[in-house]
Amino acid sequence: MIPGNFEYHKPESIDGALSILTEWGDDARVIAGGHSLIPVMKQRLTDISHLVDLGGISELKGISIDQDTVTVGAMTTQHELITNEELSKSVPLIREASLQIADPQVRYLGTIGGNVANGDPANDMPGLMQTLDASYELTGPDGVRNVKAREFYEAAYFTAREDEEILTSISFLVPNGGYAYEKQKRKIGDYATAAAGVLINIDNNICSSVSIALTNLSDTPVYCEKAVDNLVGKELNEDTIKTAVHDCVEASDPVADTRGPVEFKKYVAGIIVKKALNSAIARA
Ligand SMILES: Cc1cc2nc3c(=O)[nH]c(=O)nc-3n(C[C@H](O)[C@H](O)[C@H](O)COP(=O)(O)OP(=O)(O)OC[C@H]3O[C@@H](n4cnc5c(N)ncnc54)[C@H](O)[C@@H]3O)c2cc1C
């Protein structure tokens, strides 16, 4: 499988990349790690005549933790997320989830920006970013705007990002309390059959705040608003956890595919959410 002909650009600034995107419109596309884009180009499922490599733009790289805010450049790789000690200490949830993405080979090149921008419901980072209530910084010809991860995903591969915008960074507050990212997959290196991220704060066995989001259980990541609303202010016991799990499964909307029928996926979703909630509670 060989891609069609294309012209390769490697700008050194965001402005340089934007001017190529503006000049070539629909014919141009940015490339980050290439793990998702190159396969579709090779299968000729997309017709791109100008490929804009973001790898030469140093402003898109790096992780900074400024007081209580974490900012991650879009071109930061999953490997860098795992090996950054300061990040792992401040937000261990990121390392826990990143270690469950594919395998080291994929993680060396796969970027956080490509993972969240692609809109692939199977990617782990979108659900993780909804758990963290992250914001995405989008830079386009008309300037910079921020969109919440919880509002970014519209349908599979459709997001709030305009074609000529580049996702430049992702930011979120350092969370406190318990955390967990649990994922069920068919084998090492696979995408999730079902995965869930949880952050929770507990005060005298009462849930004072919680965030729960699901991966690959709908055509977008699912932020479990009803489960969150029902759990906050409640004592944590078997019944309230059972209700939260039920609310999350109800919020999911999986489709049957090679990972199993809908009933199976909902069953796995229930197990994964329960596991994630119990782990997060134990760590809070
Ligand atoms: C074998 C295999 C297994 C995998 N398993 C998992 C898994 O278990 N979990 C998981 O989460 N992921 C998995 N992935 C996906 C991988 O981790 C990458 O994150 C993903 O492919 C996209 O990142 P990338 O940097 O390669 O993006 P690319 O492939 O370069 O780009 C993907 C899309 O996003 C767009 N894009 C990229 N960066 C930007 C940006 N900054 N601004 C705007 N648009 C942008 C591109 O134009 C393209 O349309 C797997 C990939 C492979 C090949």
Image: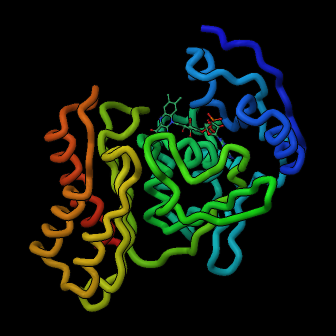
Please tell me in which quadrant of the rendered image residue 29 appears: top right
Q: Residue 212: x, y in percent?
A: 35, 65
Q: Residue 133: x, y in percent?
A: 49, 68
Relative to the observer, which residue lies in front, 134 or 28? 28
The residue that appears at 84% across and 50% down in the rendered structure is 14
Q: Can residue 194 be seen in this view?
A: yes
Please tell me in which quadrant of the rendered image residue 88 appears: bottom right
Q: Residue furthest bottom?
A: 204
* Quadrant in which the N terminus is drawn: top right
The residue that appears at 26% across and 52% down in the rendered structure is 252
Relative to the observer, which residue lies in front, 80 or 75? 75
* Quadrant in which the C terminus is drawn: bottom left
The residue that appears at 68% across and 52% down in the rendered structure is 167
- 129 displayed left or right of 278: right
Q: In this view, does 164 lie above or below 39?
A: below
Relative to the observer, which residue lies in front, 253 or 90? 253
Q: Residue 20: x, y in percent?
A: 85, 38
The residue that appears at 72% across and 49% down in the rendered structure is 166
- 221 displayed left or right of 167: left
Q: In this view, does 202 lie above or below 224?
A: below
Q: Quadrant of ligand 1?
A: top right
Q: Residue 183: x, y in percent?
A: 34, 47
Q: In this view, does 276 lie above or below 118?
A: below
